């Protein structure tokens, strides 16, 4: 196994502050995250203390307003932080992205009173969040969700089941989308639900191919009561809030995918330079050199794509199409790069003694979460050709 620290990526960052921030993230990743990743993923251990450390370092609220404890960093910088964290361990990088997704609704649509009351703890107070949109029968067709919230005086009573919830059962708060009106997208409302709310329980975590250290579980809402003061936005506005969050979240997935791919390339390159066959390092052979060149090109292209979308977002311009493109390209690239990394290591790549087999298993889920890559193609096509006429 390669225990060397990977060479820093040559990044174009906008300020000296952002360069210092990325240096801090690389240091934390190298000291606190990367050395434990393989063992803890094998045993399925969730590194809650790492998220506490990241919160204390101000890294869980980077893209949000400083007024409420955020870091006021542009997405251009925040996404590169995610990439560094995911390169060290996807459970952590993706976990930070999911936490940011869970904060998005309140930060963007909450009242001043709601943000003052809740955001400081969410952004820098050690709390960890989760995002509850999908259900057992409502995945890609999220507007068909059936979890209900019924008004009872100044409270809402939530009943139903959410599925595929990252941090399910360990989060301190959940952003929950529930039906408060008629069928379809216009009947959905968002709520901020405490993790210890009576009637809220988590199922046994799913047994997954990868990311075993990140708990993914169903959540059961059995008459969970939340005050109307925890409703985010207007009644019926929940689906538009969810879509806005997913546009930003897709960029987080893209950045994590590039991080996983970069980690796989670093491992493959180190192995190819050190492994000798026929009296030469295998990196001397043209077939492998071309594989490495293709892997590096996919990574650079993916990084450029997600950063271009991030800069549109930072400028206040529409970026939904570019976010879908970035999520699609970067996650497909991660799957291809990690597969090639396993091939370069040969039999060793197929063993758990080297991290590339874990990286390949982890890359697969990135093609599925926060909108499958087939959904991303639908989104892109609609921007190009308009809605389907059938």
Image (cartoon, helix red, strand yellow):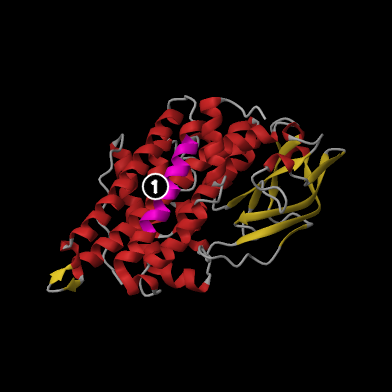
Around disc 1, counting alpha carbons within 10 Å, would you say few (fewer than 14), some (14 to 19), or many (20 or more)? many
Residue occupied by mark 1: 81
Q: Quadrant of the C terminus?
A: top right
In the image, residue 182 lies in the stretch drawn in magenta: no
Of all residues, the one furthest to the left in this rendering is: 279
- Front one among 343 and 44: 343
Residue at position x 26%, y 52% from top?
8
Image location of residue 335, percent across then percent down: 42, 55
Q: Quadrant of residue 36?
A: bottom left
- Kindly tell me whether residue 319 is visible in this rendering: yes
Image location of residue 14, percent across then percent down: 31, 34
As drawn, is 332 to the left or to the right of 344? right
On screen, residue 245 above or below 207: above
On screen, residue 78 above or below 110: below
SS type, badge 1? helix
Magenta region: 323-338
Residue at position x 61%, y 51% from top?
130
Dominant secondary structure of the magenta stretch? helix
On screen, residue 238 above or below 277: above
As drawn, is 257 to the left or to the right of 270? right
Image location of residue 180, percent across then percent down: 80, 37
- Kindly tell me whether residue 85 is visible in this rendering: no
As drawn, is 122 to the left or to the right of 30? right
Residue at position x 64%, y 50% from top?
173
Q: Quadrant of residue 375?
A: top right
Q: Quadrant of the N terminus?
A: bottom left
Of all residues, the one furthest to the front in this rendering is: 390
Image location of residue 332, percent across then percent down: 44, 49
Q: Quadrant of residue 337?
A: bottom left
In the image, residue 333 lies in the stretch drawn in magenta: yes
């Amino acid at each position: 196994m390669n225990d060397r620290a990977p060479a820093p990526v040559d990044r174009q960052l906008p300020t000296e502050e952002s360069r210092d921030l990325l240096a801090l993230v690389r240091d934390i990743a190298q000291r606190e995250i990367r050395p434990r990743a393989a063992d803890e993923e094998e045993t399925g251990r969730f590194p809650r203390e790492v998220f506490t450390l990241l919160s204390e370092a101000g890294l869980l609220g980077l893209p949000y307003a400083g007024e409420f404890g955020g870091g006021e960093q542009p997405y251009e910088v925040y996404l590169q932080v995610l990439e560094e964290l995911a390169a060290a361990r996807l459970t952590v990088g993706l976990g930070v992205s999911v936490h940011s997704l869970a904060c998005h609704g309140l930060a963007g649509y909450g009242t001043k009173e709601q943000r003052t009351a809740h955001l400081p703890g969410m952004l820098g107070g050690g709390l960890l969040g989760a995002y509850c949109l999908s259900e057992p029968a409502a995945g890609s067709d999220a507007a068909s969700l059936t979890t209900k919230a019924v008004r009872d005086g100044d409270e809402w009573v939530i009943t139903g089941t959410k599925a595929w919830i990252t941090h399910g059962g360990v989060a301190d708060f959940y952003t929950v989308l529930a039906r408060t009106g008629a069928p379809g997208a216009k009947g959905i409302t968002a709520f901020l639900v405490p993790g210890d709310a009576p009637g809220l329980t988590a199922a046994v975590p799913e047994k997954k191919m990868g990311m075993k250290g990140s708990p993914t579980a169903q959540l059961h809402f059995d008459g969970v009561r939340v005050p109307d003061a925890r409703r985010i936005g207007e009644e019926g506005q929940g689906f538009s809030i969810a879509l806005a969050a997913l546009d930003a979240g897709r960029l987080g997935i893209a950045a994590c995918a590039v991080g996983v791919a970069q980690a796989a390339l670093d491992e493959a390159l180190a192995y190819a330079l050190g492994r000798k066959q026929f009296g030469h390092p295998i990196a001397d052979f043209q077939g492998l050199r071309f594989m490495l060149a293709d892997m590096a090109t996919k990574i650079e292209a993916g990084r450029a794509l997600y950063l271009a979308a991030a800069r549109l977002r930072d400028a206040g311009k529409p970026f939904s199409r570019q976010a879908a493109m970035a999520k699609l390209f970067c996650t497909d690239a991660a799957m291809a790069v990690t597969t090639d990394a396993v091939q370069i290591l040969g039999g060793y790549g197929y063993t758990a003694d080297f991290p590339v087999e874990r990286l390949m298993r982890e890359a697969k889920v990135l093609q599925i979460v926060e909108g499958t890559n087939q959904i991303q193609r639908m989104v892109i096509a609609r921007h190009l050709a308009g809605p389907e006429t059938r």
